[in-house]
Amino acid sequence: MAGCALILVSELGGIDWLRIIGIIFISFGATFLGILAGLRPPMERRWQASLRPWRLPASLVLTVLFCLPVLIGLIGGLFGLASAFNQHNHTAVVAGGVAIDLLMIVATVASALAVARSLQRASHTAEPGFGANGHNGHRDGDLT
């Protein structure tokens, strides 16, 4: 919080060097929280089990939310290219831009669908970390 506040103050007050201190606070704070989370004992299985029914819907919602800004930007780019086409006579450049933009839209939607399919398959496993047959993918006695 202190780092974000310092960055806000630096932006509003025009104090450029204060941003560096804010960034350092944010970086060290995130590192410290990561270390604390790693050293903490594992959570109870009951709490994780209560979240299990919500894993797939939450993952799908997050996938859509992460892809929406990209799609909105790419679709906005199509409108920008259309207005450029009407104002200038650069047909080949605009056509190339439209082709690249459409290709990126298709790739974004395809990757979101692939993520959704993978999440759907992963949600049907018996236990996290174990395959359908109850093994973790290692040979008996082999922990590597």
Image: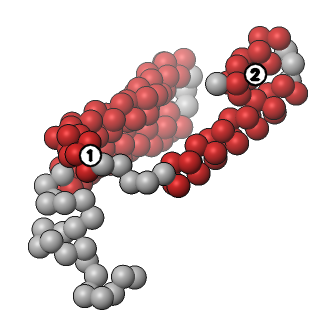
Instruction: State the quadrant of the C terminus.
Output: bottom left
Estimate the spatial distance between the alpha carbons at disc 2 and disc 1, rounded to whole Å: 36 Å
Residue 133 appears in the rendering: yes
How many neighbours does mark 1 have within 10 angstroms: few (below 14), some (14-19), or many (20 or more)?
A: few
Q: Mark 2 or mark 1: which comes first in sequence?
A: 2
Residue 113 appears in the rendering: no
Q: Nearer the viewer, mark 2 or mark 1?
A: 1
Q: Which residue is mark 1?
A: 48
How many neighbours does mark 2 have within 10 angstroms: few (below 14), some (14-19), or many (20 or more)?
A: many
- Of 64 and 15, nearer the camera is 15
Which amino acid is tagged 1?
Gln
Image spot of residue 128 (x, y percent)? 24, 59
Image spot of residue 87 (x, y percent)? 54, 17
Secondary element type, mark 1: helix
What number is the disc on residue 6? 2
- Of 43 and 16, nearer the camera is 43
Vertically, is 57 above or below 126? above
Q: Is residue 19 left or right of residue 120?
A: right
Vertically, is 38 above or below 106? below
